[in-house]
Amino acid sequence: YVEAGYRRIKLKIKPGWDVEPVRAVRERFPTIPLQVDANTAYALADAQHLGELDAFGLLLIEQPFPEDQMLAHAKLARQIRTPVCLDESIHSLQAAADAIELGACSIINIKPGRVGGYLEARRIHDLCAEHSIPVWMGGMLETGIGRAGNVAMAAMANFTLPGDTSASDRYYHQDLTEPFVLRDGRLKVPSGPGLGVTVDENRLREVTTAVEMVRQRASSVRAGSPPR
């Protein structure tokens, strides 16, 4: 991936598989931004052990504790030098506001699908910008349709860290849209109408397993008459 142009490495960690793997990757790639993702695998009792990761100059440690443990994250953030990033904990604007007020993180990962869509994601972005909290775009498995929205949002001013918006061919042999191609570590923001991409309808039919139609029920109130 480094040879392909990706600009940072994210390493998954868990108890028993953390310090030594991080050491090995850092020795192999001494200058590239390196971050770790714990996916809630640790507890506050592990704080001293997690502090050993400070030696490797990590960009961040992502979601070390379960998502409902805001106070534990705040305590950890005061005990280690590595910046704490929250992911699973940030499911709404209010959750982001609480995390910032508690000092539970200094970086936030925004996933539009997790927070309820792009409008809420935009609100979280703006809140973080107001408090000088950098953000980055999460998500990896979106098709070209979702990826288009993520790439466009990731171009906003406070998305200052490399995100998970990878090239289409990392996950799909054939996408539902024209492929996103990595060039010099970057993806081009689509510039066409709407999301900026064109759906390959033949490919969409090939992979569709079910169709559900949603129709708005016609109103029974006549035009000009007041609702009852």
Image (cartoon, rainbow, N blue to C red):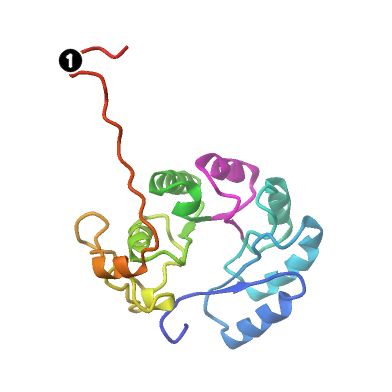
**Image location (x, y in percent) of residue 72:** 73, 50
Horizontal side, residue 110 vs residue 77: left or right: left
**Image location (x, y in percent) of residue 191:** 22, 62
Where on the picture, by quarter, is residue 162?
bottom left
The one nearer the camera, 210 or 131, is: 210
* Number of callouts: 1
Q: Residue at x 50, y 46 (%)?
A: 131
The one nearer the camera, 211 or 43, is: 211
Q: For the magenta stretch, what is the residue range?
A: 84-108
Callout 1 amino acid: Gly
Q: Is residue 9 magenta?
A: no
Q: Which residue is mark 1?
A: 224
Res 176 visible: no
Q: Residue at x 77, y 61 (%)?
A: 47
**Image location (x, y in percent) of residue 17:** 73, 76
For the residue labelled by badge 1, is the local secondary structure a helix, a strand or a loop?
loop
Where on the picture, by quarter, is residue 100?
top right
Q: Residue at x 72, y 81 (%)?
A: 20
The one nearer the camera, 69 or 59, is: 69
Q: Is residue 105 magenta?
A: yes
Horizontal side, residue 29 vs residue 127: left or right: right
The quarter in which the C terminus is drawn is top left
User: Relative to 123, is 161 above or below?
Assistant: below
Horizontal side, residue 149 vs residue 161: left or right: left
Where on the picture, by quarter, is residue 148?
bottom left
